[in-house]
Image (tube, rainbow, N blue to C red):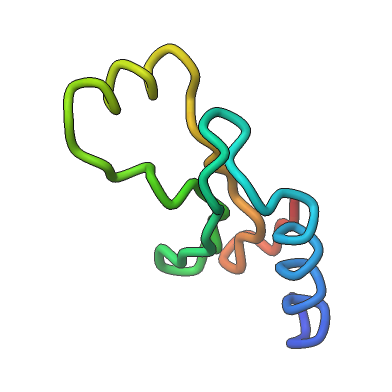
Amino acid sequence: MFDRVTVLETIDSAFDRQRVCAACGAPTVLRTEGNVVLLECSELGAAGILSRIGGFLMPHTQHVVIDLSEAIAA
């Protein structure tokens, strides 16, 4: 299990390494989903046919930073 300092350092480090989406250059955001912290493109949920086609051809940044349920850090 991680302590709070380790969790915060891991999250800060992941955010510092990738502040913008590799596909579109939009800022990345941190989001939680249960016990999982994700780093993803802020435009990931954008509507519109062009956004969906672009997202299919060049996937937006989205990866697990830390999974507290499994005690796994990226």
Q: Residue at x 49, y 18 (%)?
A: 58
Viewport quadrant of the N terminus: bottom right
Left or right: residue 49 versus residue 14 is: left
* Residue at the image position 55 percent from the left and 38 percent from the top: 61
> Residue 57: image x %, image y %?
43, 12
Tell which of 1 and 40 is nearer to you: 40
In this picture, residue 66 sits left or right of residue 46: right
Who's the residue at 74% across and 57% down the image? 14
Dividing the picture into quarters, in which one does residue 33 lie? bottom left
Q: Nearer the viewer, residue 20 or 67?
A: 20
Q: Quadrant of residue 22?
A: top right
Q: Residue furthest bottom?
A: 4
Give the answer, above or below, for where 20 lies relative to 69: above
12 and 64: which is toward the camera: 12
Which residue shows up at 71% across the image and 68% down it?
Answer: 11
- Taking the view exactly as shown, the residue that stands out farthest to the top is 57
Kindly indicate the quadrant of the structure image that contains residue 53: top left
Q: Position of residue 69 (x, y in %)?
A: 56, 65
Residue 68, position in %: x, y?
61, 68
The vertical placement of 61 against 39, above or below, is above
Q: Report the number of discs.
A: 0
Figure check: 33 above or below 49: below
The residue positioned farthest toward the left in the image shown: 48
* Horizontal side, residue 53 vs residue 22: left or right: left
Q: Give coordinates of residue 60: x percent, y percent.
A: 49, 33
Q: Nearer the viewer, residue 12 or 54?
A: 54
